[in-house]
Every structure is written in C-alpha cells, then in structure tokens.
C-alpha cells in the first residue's frame, strides 16, 4: 500500500471531502495542515504542482486539484460505484453539487457587506431549498431513497453531499432536510468509520 500525504491548510475547505473519503475507506494518511499564517506554505509552494492546495502525495507522486484527488481516492477504495452506470451516477451527484457550490463560493468570497447579505438570503431562501429538493428526487431513484445515492453502499456522492451540508451549514442557516435526504445524512454520519473520524474531529 502506498504512503499517502494530503497537504492543505488547517481548515476543512476543499480537503475535507478527501479526508472523509480516506476515513470511510479506513485508510490512514498523513494529514499535513499548513498554518493559515501561510509562511510555511509560501516556502513549500514553489515545489507544488499548480502552486495550490490541496495536493496529494502518493509515494513520490504529487496530484493537484481537489476534484482529481477526491476521485482518485474514491476509485482506489471502492467509493466510486462498481460499474460504468454507477460511476456515472456518482458523477451526476458531483456535477449537481458543483453547480450548487458556485453559490456557496460566491458568498465566501464576497467582501461587500450588502452584497453578502443578499447572497446569504438567496442561498438560504432559494438555492439551498432547490438543491435539497433536487437531491431528494435523485435519492428516491435508488432504493426508494432509503439507502445511498448509488448502489448499495456509501460512495463519494454521499460523502460529498454530507460535507457540503456540514460546511455550508457553518456559514448559512440550512433549511430542514427533506425526509430521505435527512435519513441519508444520518447514515453518512453514522457510518462506523466516518463516525470515528467525526468523533476525533470533534465538532
Ligand atoms: N481548482 C483547485 C483550486 C485550489 C485552490 O484555490 N487552492 C487555494 C486554497 S482553497 C490555495 O491553494 N490558495 C493558496 C495559494 O494560492 O497560495 C482545486 O480544486 O484544488
């Protein structure tokens, strides 16, 4: 088994879905967190492909881009579906999540207070309810919504949706989950390996 080192900052951000995927797989990895003061990062930055984090080191190889890394880890550990149809279903959820995340990123990077308030209101009153309804419909297509998004076991799709609700929930007030989505979020949080990771994460 190769040695894995995930480099990011000391925050959840773009790395947390990868940390959660490693946790779900029961795969240990070095969780290198550069301090947000950035001094240490600035020294290392020239050696990192694309000069951005996250970056995953697999033995001697460096992989940039959070989307590539999360897919790589998911494929390595059976979290990306078991056939082309299931791989595609995972991709549909990732695409749906990325569409929604544009709104969340817009809020995160907006500096103007008035615009921030407008974006937050739109997120809470429109974008989040729309996103949750869409996910509820997709979820119901598999096992009536009582299992996971894809197939019969947890995948990157479930992990990513849980992580988004967790991180966006820290910046905005989440609407109530529709019933099947609420059940899914509970199943992810209670997955034995994820539960263990979340207990250690301690938030
Ligand atoms: N598309 C890239 C974006 C990476 C990115 O924006 N990384 C930021 C942190 S979230 C970064 O490394 N900032 C520090 C810098 O650019 O020096 C990904 O998803 O990995």
Image: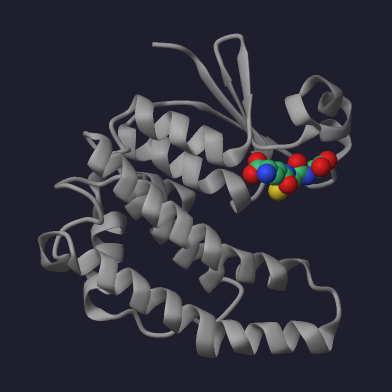
Q: Nearer the viewer, residue 87 or 194?
A: 87
* Placement of 56 over or under 109, stated as above or below: above
How many numbered dots are placed on residues in this image?
0
- Looking at the image, residue 165 sits to the left or right of residue 191; the answer is right
Quadrant for the N terminus, please. Answer: top left
The residue depicted at 44 percent of the width and 52 percent of the height is 94
Quadrant of the rendered image holding ligand 1: top right
| Above or below, comparing residue 57 to residue 81 in the picture | above
Residue placed most toward the observer, 71 or 185: 71
Q: Is residue 34 left or right of residue 123?
A: right
Residue 169 drawn at (x, y percent): 52, 72
Determine if residue 44 is in view.
yes
Q: Quadrant of residue 63?
A: top right
**Which residue is painted at 60% across and 48% down in the image?**
14
Residue at image coords 53%, 67%: 100
**Quadrant of residue 41 within the rendered picture:** top right
Find residue 195 and report its horizontal and vertical position in percent. Answer: 31, 50
**Is residue 35 in view?**
no
Residue 153 vertical position relative to residue 50 in the rendered view, above or below: below
* Residue 137 % position (x, y): 26, 73
Nearer to the camera, 202 or 165: 165
Quarter-of-image position of residue 142: bottom left
């Amino acid at each position: 088994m190769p040695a894995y080192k995930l480099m990011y900052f000391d925050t959840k951000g773009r790395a947390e879905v990868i940390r959660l995927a490693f946790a779900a797989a029961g795969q240990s990895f070095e969780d290198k967190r550069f301090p947000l003061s950035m001094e240490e990062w600035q020294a290392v930055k020239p050696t990192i492909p694309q000069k951005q984090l996250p970056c995953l080191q697999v033995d001697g190889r460096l992989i940039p881009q959070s989307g590539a890394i999360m897919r790589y880890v998911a494929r390595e550990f059976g979290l990306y579906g078991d056939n082309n149809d299931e791989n595609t279903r995972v991709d549909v959820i990732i695409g749906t999540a990325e569409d929604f995340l544009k709104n969340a990123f817009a809020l995160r990077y907006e500096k103007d207070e008035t615009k921030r308030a407008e974006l937050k209101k739109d997120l809470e009153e429109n974008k989040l309810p729309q996103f949750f309804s869409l996910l509820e419909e997709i979820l119901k297509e598999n096992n009536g919504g009582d299992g996971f998004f894809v197939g019969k076991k947890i995948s990157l799709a479930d992990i990513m949706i849980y992580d988004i609700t967790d991180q966006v929930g820290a910046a905005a007030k989440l609407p109530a989950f529709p019933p099947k989505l609420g059940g899914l979020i509970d199943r992810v949080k209670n997955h034995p390996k994820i539960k263990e990771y979340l207990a250690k994460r301690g938030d």
